[in-house]
Amino acid sequence: MKAGFALAMAIAITGQVLYHFMQKQVAPGAHPVLALIAFYAGAAVMSLPLFALFPLSTPLPQAVGELGGAVWGVAVAIVLIELGFLLAYRAGGSLSSAFVLSASVVTGALLVIGLVVFKEAVSLKQLAGLALCLAGIWLLSGNRAAH
């Protein structure tokens, strides 16, 4: 595994663990839309110093223009993920089962999308690994959808 990929995955995994732990900690009485706005205002403020690590190589207006329309798709996805998990945890979903259910469905959906849209090759070995991962997720979840 390449060091850059390993570091990126360590960052993403740390973020996911922190994300779900903190989502579960949001006060039950907090307004969900206000919570979303606060999440992203805070994220925007914390993102600004990252320009020191990842400086712009083109002028800001050009860099913004290069973002493209996919940014809006990601923005919609973020809001759906945030709101979905916030409401799932408020409805009594546990940290393990809410994520496990979503991860297993997302894994299957992304496999199909990768094959159909991006023409990604999938080997029998990878399919066997996916099956084992899904079986492990199912076993870890305790076979419950929302406890």
Image (cartoon, rainbow, N blue to C red):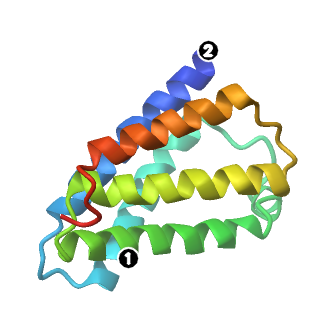
| Residue 113 placement: quadrant | bottom right
Give how far across and how far down residue 49 sits, in percent: 47, 44
Q: Residues within 10 Å of mark 2 (few under 14, many from 20)?
A: few
Identified by mark 1, the residue type is Ile
Give how far across and how far down residue 44 sits, in percent: 46, 60
Decide if residue 37 is on the left or right side of residue 28.
right
Give how far across and how far down residue 64 sits, in percent: 75, 62
Determine the residue positioned at 12% across, 82% down.
Answer: 29
| Residue 130 placement: quadrant | top right
Say which residue label 2 marks.
1
Figure check: 72 above or below 137:
below
Identified by mark 2, the residue type is Met
Figure check: 17 above or below 90:
above
Q: Nearer the viewer, residue 102 or 140?
A: 140
Give how far across and how far down residue 4 sits, in percent: 61, 21
Decide if residue 96 is on the left or right side of residue 67.
left
Quote the CA–CA distance across marks 2 and 1.
Answer: 37 Å
Say which residue label 1 marks.
37
Figure check: 34 above or below 45:
below
The image quadrant where one finds the C terminus is bottom left
Determine the residue positioned at 51% across, 31% down.
Answer: 9
View extreme (right): residue: 119
| Residue 137 placement: quadrant | top left
Q: Which SS class for mark 1?
A: helix
Q: Nearer the viewer, residue 143 or 94?
A: 143
Circle 2 or circle 1, nearest the eye: 2
Decide if residue 115 is on the left or right side of residue 72.
right
Circle number at residue 125: none
Determine the residue positioned at 83% across, 56% down.
Answer: 116
Q: Residues within 10 Å of mark 1 (few under 14, many from 20)?
A: few
Q: Nearer the viewer, residue 144 or 100?
A: 144
